[in-house]
Image (cartoon, helix red, strand yellow):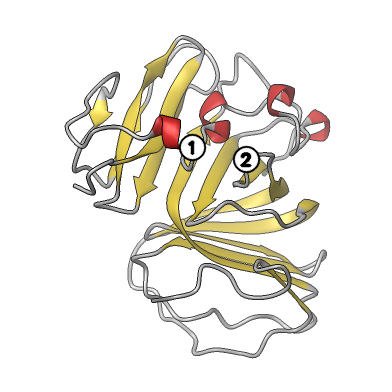
C-alpha cells in the first residue's frame, strides 16, 4: 500500500528529488498555463485556484484535493506561470520560476514518480480520495489576488471546503439525496449550467469507500465525494 505522502511533516519534500522513470503519455490531458494559488485549508485539504492565460487577474478554475487523512502541514504559495496538467484522476503542477512541483493523484493511480526538473525547492506528492475541479462563473468573478487559502469566504467554491473526513458527512451506501449525477457506486460525475458560483464542476473519488455526488446547489455547482458507511 502506497504512503499517502512522503517528506517533512508527512507532506512536503524540500530539496531536489531523485529522478524517476519518465512516463510516456498516450492519452489526452488538459493543460493550463497561468498564475495560481495553492495551499492547505483549515479542514486539511489542498485547494488551488488558477488564472489561465490570457491572465486577467480573475480565477478561471478551482481544484480541491482530499488526501486519505487530514493534512496539518503548512502550504500557502502563489505561483507564476505555472503549468497545470489534469489527466487520469491526477493533477500535476509545475512552476519553474518558483521551483515548485506538485503531483496529486487518487490512490488507485499507479503512475511512477515524475521526472523532476533540476533545482526543485518544494515538491508535494500525495495519494488521495478526491480530486474535484470547479469552473468559475464569469458573471461572478473572483480575484486571485484577494483569495486566501485559510478563508473560505474569500471566494472559494462552497464544495472546496466540504469536509470529506467528517463522520457527520458520511452516508449510507444507498444514499441518493441531492445527487443529480453520480450517486452510490459512481467513482466520478460532473455537472454544468448551474446558477451562481461556480457554474459547473466535476469530481473523481476513490471507490468503493467513496462515491461521487454532483448537482446544482442554491449557491452554485456542488461536486464532492461522500464516504460510504458500509464500504459499498
**Viewer-side residue, 6 vs 15:** 6
* Residue 55, percent from left and from top: 73, 39
* Residue 114, percent from left and from top: 54, 79
**Viewer-side residue, 169 vs 204:** 169
C-alpha span from label 2 to label 1: 9 Å
Q: Identify which residue is drawn at 76% across, 27% down.
A: 143
All told, the count of numbered labels is 2
**Which quadrant of the rendered structure holds the N terminus?**
bottom left
2 or 1: mark nearer the eye:
1
Q: Which is nearer the N-term, disc 2 or disc 1?
A: 2
Quarter of the image for residue 88 reads bottom left
Task: Tell me, yes or no, whether the two marked residues, 2 and 1, touch with CB atoms within 8 Å.
Answer: yes
Q: Which mark is residue 43?
A: 2
Give the class, few, some or many, for how many residues have Cα within 10 Å of label 1's Cα (few <14, many ≥20): few
In the depicted structure, whether residue 125 falls above or below residue 203 = below
* Residue 59, percent from left and from top: 67, 33
**Viewer-side residue, 38 vs 97:** 38
- Note whether residue 120 is visible: yes
- Note whether residue 201 is visible: no
Q: Which mark is residue 92?
A: none
Say whether residue 157 is left or right of residue 68: right
Quarter of the image for residue 117 reads bottom right
Q: Which residue is mark 1?
A: 166
Mark 1: secondary structure:
loop
Q: Identify which residue is drawn at 31% across, 39% down.
A: 212
Give the class, few, some or many, for how many residues have Cα within 10 Å of label 2's Cα (few <14, many ≥20): some
Mark 2: secondary structure:
loop
Say whether residue 132 is left or right of residue 146: left
Q: Identify which residue is drawn at 63% across, 54% down.
A: 71
Q: Identify which residue is drawn at 51% across, 29% down.
A: 159
Amino acid at each position: 500500500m502506497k504512503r499517502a505522502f512522503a517528506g517533512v511533516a508527512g507532506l512536503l519534500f524540500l530539496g531536489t528529488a531523485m529522478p524517476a522513470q519518465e512516463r510516456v503519455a498516450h492519452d489526452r490531458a488538459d493543460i493550463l498555463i497561468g498564475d495560481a494559488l495553492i495551499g492547505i485549508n483549515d479542514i486539511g485539504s489542498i485547494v488551488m485556484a488558477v488564472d489561465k492565460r490570457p491572465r486577467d487577474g480573475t480565477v478561471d478554475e478551482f481544484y480541491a484535493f482530499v488526501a486519505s487523512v487530514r493534512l496539518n502541514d503548512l502550504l500557502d504559495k502563489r505561483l507564476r506561470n505555472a503549468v497545470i496538467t489534469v489527466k487520469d484522476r491526477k493533477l500535476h503542477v509545475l512552476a519553474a520560476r518558483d521551483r515548485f512541483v506538485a503531483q496529486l493523484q487518487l490512490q488507485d493511480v499507479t503512475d511512477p514518480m515524475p521526472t523532476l526538473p533540476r533545482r526543485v525547492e518544494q515538491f508535494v506528492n500525495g495519494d488521495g480520495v478526491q480530486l474535484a475541479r470547479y469552473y468559475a462563473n464569469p458573471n461572478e468573478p473572483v480575484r486571485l489576488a484577494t483569495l486566501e487559502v485559510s478563508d473560505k469566504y474569500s471566494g472559494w467554491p462552497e464544495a472546496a471546503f466540504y469536509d470529506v473526513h467528517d463522520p457527520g458527512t458520511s452516508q449510507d451506501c444507498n444514499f441518493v439525496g441531492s445527487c443529480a449525477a453520480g450517486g452510490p457506486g459512481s467513482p466520478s460525475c460532473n455537472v454544468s449550467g448551474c446558477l451562481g458560483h461556480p457554474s459547473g464542476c466535476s469530481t473523481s473519488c476513490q471507490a468503493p469507500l467513496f462515491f461521487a455526488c454532483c448537482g446544482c446547489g442554491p449557491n452554485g455547482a456542488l461536486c464532492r465525494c461522500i464516504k460510504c458507511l458500509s464500504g459499498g
